[in-house]
Image: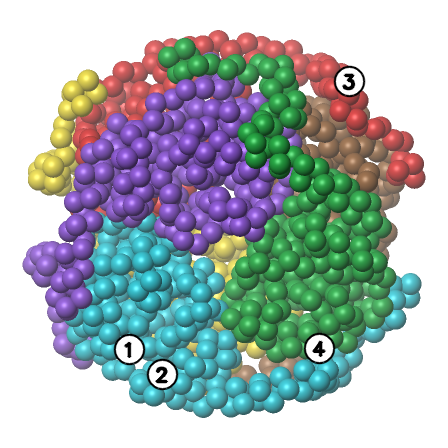
Chain colours: A brown, B yellow, C red, D cyan, E purple, F green
Amino acid sequence: VASNVVIRNIERADQAVIDRLGRAGVATAHEAYGRRGLLEPSIRPRQVGAAIAGSAVTVLCPPGDNMMLHAVVEVLQPGDIVVVSTTSESNDAMFGDLLATSFMAYGAVGLIIEAGVRDTATLREMGFPVWSKVVHAQGTVKATPGSVNVPMVCGGVSVTPGDVVIADDDGAMIVSRAEAELTLDEAEKRLEQETATRERLQTGELGLDLYGMRERLEGLGVNWIDSTDEV
Amino acid sequence: VASNVVIRNIERADQAVIDRLGRAGVATAHEAYGRRGLLEPSIRPRQVGAAIAGSAVTVLCPPGDNMMLHAVVEVLQPGDIVVVSTTSESNDAMFGDLLATSFMAYGAVGLIIEAGVRDTATLREMGFPVWSKVVHAQGTVKATPGSVNVPMVCGGVSVTPGDVVIADDDGAMIVSRAEAELTLDEAEKRLEQETATRERLQTGELGLDLYGMRERLEGLGVNWIDSTDEV
Amino acid sequence: VASNVVIRNIERADQAVIDRLGRAGVATAHEAYGRRGLLEPSIRPRQVGAAIAGSAVTVLCPPGDNMMLHAVVEVLQPGDIVVVSTTSESNDAMFGDLLATSFMAYGAVGLIIEAGVRDTATLREMGFPVWSKVVHAQGTVKATPGSVNVPMVCGGVSVTPGDVVIADDDGAMIVSRAEAELTLDEAEKRLEQETATRERLQTGELGLDLYGMRERLEGLGVNWIDSTDEV
Amino acid sequence: VASNVVIRNIERADQAVIDRLGRAGVATAHEAYGRRGLLEPSIRPRQVGAAIAGSAVTVLCPPGDNMMLHAVVEVLQPGDIVVVSTTSESNDAMFGDLLATSFMAYGAVGLIIEAGVRDTATLREMGFPVWSKVVHAQGTVKATPGSVNVPMVCGGVSVTPGDVVIADDDGAMIVSRAEAELTLDEAEKRLEQETATRERLQTGELGLDLYGMRERLEGLGVNWIDSTDEV
Amino acid sequence: VASNVVIRNIERADQAVIDRLGRAGVATAHEAYGRRGLLEPSIRPRQVGAAIAGSAVTVLCPPGDNMMLHAVVEVLQPGDIVVVSTTSESNDAMFGDLLATSFMAYGAVGLIIEAGVRDTATLREMGFPVWSKVVHAQGTVKATPGSVNVPMVCGGVSVTPGDVVIADDDGAMIVSRAEAELTLDEAEKRLEQETATRERLQTGELGLDLYGMRERLEGLGVNWIDSTDEV
Amino acid sequence: VASNVVIRNIERADQAVIDRLGRAGVATAHEAYGRRGLLEPSIRPRQVGAAIAGSAVTVLCPPGDNMMLHAVVEVLQPGDIVVVSTTSESNDAMFGDLLATSFMAYGAVGLIIEAGVRDTATLREMGFPVWSKVVHAQGTVKATPGSVNVPMVCGGVSVTPGDVVIADDDGAMIVSRAEAELTLDEAEKRLEQETATRERLQTGELGLDLYGMRERLEGLGVNWIDSTDEV
């Protein structure tokens, strides 16, 4: 049974693809990816307005022990996003401004963690964005090992090292490396369509008609009634 | 058993009354309304500083299906607030920037939803305020019908179409159309009193004496003691 | 069985110690205090960027009844922080802008409450910071007594009147009066060390080596592997 | 604004209809009622195997105050089920064995409460079934009034006094008095069908074919594949 | 700063007092103790029908680490109840059938734990009752120390070693050693009164009149109305 | 992007291995598997005393739509356990006694579902055990497709079709097919050791000494003190 390993090298998706997925944003990329990959809404941004995309470097820690977050630093590459999960539920602060300093020194662009973070005011000043389950200053020990760059589950979603992570004000999501390009194509098509649709909706055209839903609703037995008096 | 209907026309309260209730704000209107009508605190603002009031147009959706949010658009009138509930618990994003575009084109001024919303950064740019249970990008299907403008429960409170909705940084509340004016009178009286009270409190006068609570506490057996040594 | 008392006078820690603990901040003071004293993460700041420290004046209320928050005002001294708990779980708004006006008139610098607050927009304008379990406008009655300045539990932590309270964007914590100075010494040592460490980390030096964790991890059986192919 | 009233007399549904709805059970009656009326799953049975139906007598209490549960006793009639809600969220024990003694003396057959209960071992011995949000011994005061037999929301569902309540191991639900008979007819039809369907399913016949879902799934683009190798 | 200690000897309350408090039960003892001392309702019995009382031996553990539960065994005395808390929130199983075997060998009569337990089927067979936050099989490490017999908070209540613990189907509570006898006197008085009251209520006498609440409600403005038509 | 497929055939582990893992139970198998594979504690047994093991047949449904639970029946084989997840969070009852009749006709021995179940009284009578997030009677639609026998996440754990599922009163867990035998060997070794250890603990021998933890604690700085007076 493989455990307690640090995998130094992983395959990453093409950076241009990653960057464009980041510009598409979580909501659009999630639709483009077949409505998959979205982390549970308990994983929330701890700043307003940050929008990032990068390659997932995964860290699996015991609850209340952040030693592996120190071990991950030397395998980071510019553009990486560190994704952290614990082997059982924890709200402890596994991450603060000192680790953020190290992460930035090695080029990481953000953190997604199913646990707590602290030093949030300093992190915002430093411009290092985090998505976490809670903000909590609770300190951790450094006594029990875990793993770096193994597949794991974070926020209810399977993450493989090297997957693409996208995160913004709407939350965070994972796109598998193999499907990144296909998802990007689909996402950019959607963005174009959305721009066109937005213009029509602004003039008062109805999505109900635009998308053919009026007929569908009629077929499903919905009745339009002028007022409650008729019910 | 009536279900799956779209009611086109509803009675609304007087717009001047609505506007003045909005200026009173949720906390004061809630007191004026006999401490009723307040939605559960899980329904939170997804922006800072928005304060609105309007007429409730209700939408009842199946979980994970936002088709009725498209059906509601054509019955909206300027000043309306769309209030959305699901037939069973859901955190999915039933609402995003495209629907907001339609809602704004028809004059709606906000959304209250016991489910999720997405595109929150864009919604803030557009100036369309939302109060929701979560922020979650999770997409929905368009397969199963629901209803527009039927009575329903949202955030633990009964809502009848045409009720007055008030929402600000403190949350969201419902005032029945029939009681809107009475509530406004009471709210404006309270605002005046609060201004007077505030001035007295600023000078150090005690609410304990101002409201006659010192006697009440004595009557209830409270003891004032100089220090712990005396206990 | 002592209950329903208002204790007028309490011992407070030295104000200079309190102020310096506030500058150290919650995360550092929590580490310096042996990772104790931190309130549960459900107690969150209701503004961004406030950082305070002060002496705990405690208030214990029945659920849904804020009468004792009026009784506490006259025992407040400049620099105090009011810490509020309820005898059973409650989300009601025990505190709003009028009470804040009184609290400020007597010099209180903040509120920590395991219940709800309202008038949050006004509180931010007034510059009176609060940490609470929820924002909820729900009004309370004034019918049943409680106590002021008795020991109690707030956010899972024992609080004795006169303890030092520290609160910022990371949450809120309690340091016992007797241990305040010792904790400050330790906290200031840590701040110095952190500044030195931060500089080294910025240059790319690894915490893994800096803290001797590489050897510890090897001793615990962690394996470094070049790539997944080797697993 | 009407509040703080005790309504002595309410209309009830036909007892034979109520009894037969009880025999249909919550799951079947809920389907027969158009999948409406079900209380949130947080309202759970505090015994195993009880199954009841009766007329809703409603009680609305302030949080932490059970005075109105004493006021309701004299308006109870044999077969009634008391449905309790609080004006804001509460987990306090509003009900125990003494109130159950009174309720049984007046013929009530059960309690549904969006709050806590205590004396659960004694309640099971007495044979008085309860459905509650929590079991908690927390005592309450008797200081602030509420109402008996006013419309209210319990477990996310609107309840009007005299509605039919059905509760069993699956939870609790409300059927409006006006729709009770229609719902019963539909429920009994379903029970018959279910018996027939059960027999066919026991022989290995597939619901997929029985309900015509295979074609629907094909129409929706589902692919049947022999093994993962083909994906 | 004292931490990581095992205190071998503690003062315990008189065993006869403890036993009689156990017979009074949690609900009655909680009332007798001034409605204090009750643990949050998240701490639930993991068996049906157990009712115990004993002296609190406290254990404070790091999250996910149960080493101190081994350290506590040799300080146990017949009649003790082990009360466990973690330094930060945890759902891990700190306790199972092997530890229960040791605890029983030293005379402990039960466990209260703000974390998880496992082997629950075996624990029920062994007749060792537990009250816990969750049932979860999640294993723990043995790497980081904690303390035995230090004051701590469990389930939102302060516990001092040697306090009396009472636990039954309604939950668990703490009575301070100093107040145990006084609380027992009050509890036994209540039990007698309750027996008398129960008999009167069984005959249909109303608590409303028995406790003088009818007048109180009238004084508070409650209106009795014959039917909704009069509202 | 593969989705909406039904995979008919999967590889299963050896039935003798599965059966013996079931006899080891969740707690022991979880330790043997390196403390991995355990579902979150929110997934709870809905009966007392059931203990099963089988091969995972997975079903991924949209929220509020159980059509795929009908599609799974014909691919079931004797000894299978159906594991169900939804594409976004849902508490709806996807499963009741009719589906259980079908499942039993095809030899399935249990259900693990991250959603709701109903007809729980009947399920217990039928002897079909279920582990679910909630009990809720809420009905579902049959409108939107999902998949059968695709990899997915359930209760925070990755599940591949054909993995071994073990479930008992402590919860539910997954062991990968590839590691089933190794895990069984380790589990049976542990069972033997536990029997030996249990006998020694029963005589009062201390785990503290048996496992060498006394030295470890001393090394970590724990102090044994006779009484609080010495602190």
Q: Within 10 Å of the Cα at label 1, are there few (<14), some (14-19), or many (20+) other Cα atoms? A: many
Quarter occupied by the C terminus of chain F: top left
Residue on which disc 4 sits? F105
Residue on which disc 2 sits? D18
Q: Earlier in the sequence, mark 1 or mark 2?
A: 2
Q: Position of residue C189 (x, y in %)?
A: 55, 9
- Tell me the distance, in whole angstroms, between the alpha carbons under discs 1 and 2: 9 Å
| Secondary-structure class at tag 1 | loop
- The subunit letter for the residue under badge 4 reads F
Q: Within 10 Å of the Cα at label 4, are there few (<14), some (14-19), or many (20+) other Cα atoms? A: some
Q: Quadrant of residue D193?
A: bottom right
Residue type at mark 1? Gly
Q: Position of residue C49 (x, y in %)?
A: 48, 30
- Tell me the distance, in whole angstroms, between the alpha carbons under discs 3 and 4: 58 Å
Residue located 57% across and 23% down the image: E145
Residue on which disc 1 sits? D79
| Secondary-structure class at tag 4 | helix
